Image (cartoon, rainbow, N blue to C red):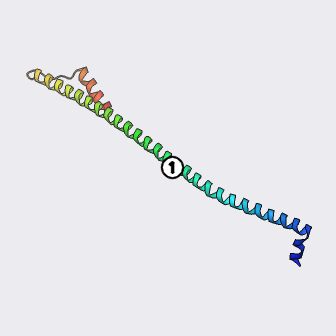
Amino acid sequence: MMLAFLATPIGRWVGSIVGGALLIVALVAGFRLWLHGHDKAILSGYVAKSEKDASDALVKKLQHDLLLGQQIREQADKASEQLDIEAQKRRDADEKAIADNKGGASRVTRDDLDRVDRVRNAR
């Protein structure tokens, strides 16, 4: 009975509509499936690129921090060397003053007190 309906002009018209609708549904479903795979491939490339960019930025920051740390260490070493030189000059001057004043009485001068204050404040 159903097959007889399809043989009539209205049946052919309904069959064409149903067949066309099924074809459209199949085309849309196929396109959506293709689009899903396509988008997934593109997004995976973007994710990989963004992860690489983030790791490159981290490496650059770490290199900058390392260079900055090296510069600070060099400046601290220079300052320490300068302080050692100044301390040695003061010791040499003190030894010379003691050697020059061997026979005489020792006396404390204002410069001696200032030097003691500076050394005490430097610590």
Q: Nearer the viewer, residue 109 or 20?
A: 20
Judged left or right of residue 54, residue 28 is right
- Percent position of residue 100, x then y: 11, 20
Residue 123 seen by the camera: no
- Percent position of residue 4, x then y: 89, 76
Three-letter amino acid code at the position of disc 1:
Glu
Q: Nearer the viewer, residue 76 or 88?
A: 76
- Percent position of residue 47, x then y: 55, 51
Local crowd size for mark 1, using a 10 Å CA cut-off: few (<14), some (14–19), many (≥20): few
Q: Nearer the viewer, residue 58 or 50?
A: 50
In the image, residue 15 sits, relative to residue 99, either above or below, namely: below
Judged from the image, the secondary structure of the residue bearing numbered disc 1 is: helix
- Percent position of residue 32, x then y: 69, 58
In the image, residue 76 sits, relative to residue 14, either above or below, namely: above
Quadrant location of the N terminus in the rendered image: bottom right
Name the residue rendered at 20%, 25% in the picture.
89
Outermost residue toward the bottom?
A: 1
- Would you name the residue on which mark 1 appears? 51
Judged left or right of residue 117, residue 54 is right
Q: For residue 74, what is the image quadrant?
A: top left
Name the residue rendered at 28%, 33% in the picture.
80
Residue 115 seen by the camera: yes
Judged left or right of residue 82, residue 62 is right
Judged left or right of residue 34, residue 82 is left
Name the residue rendered at 73%, 63% in the picture.
26
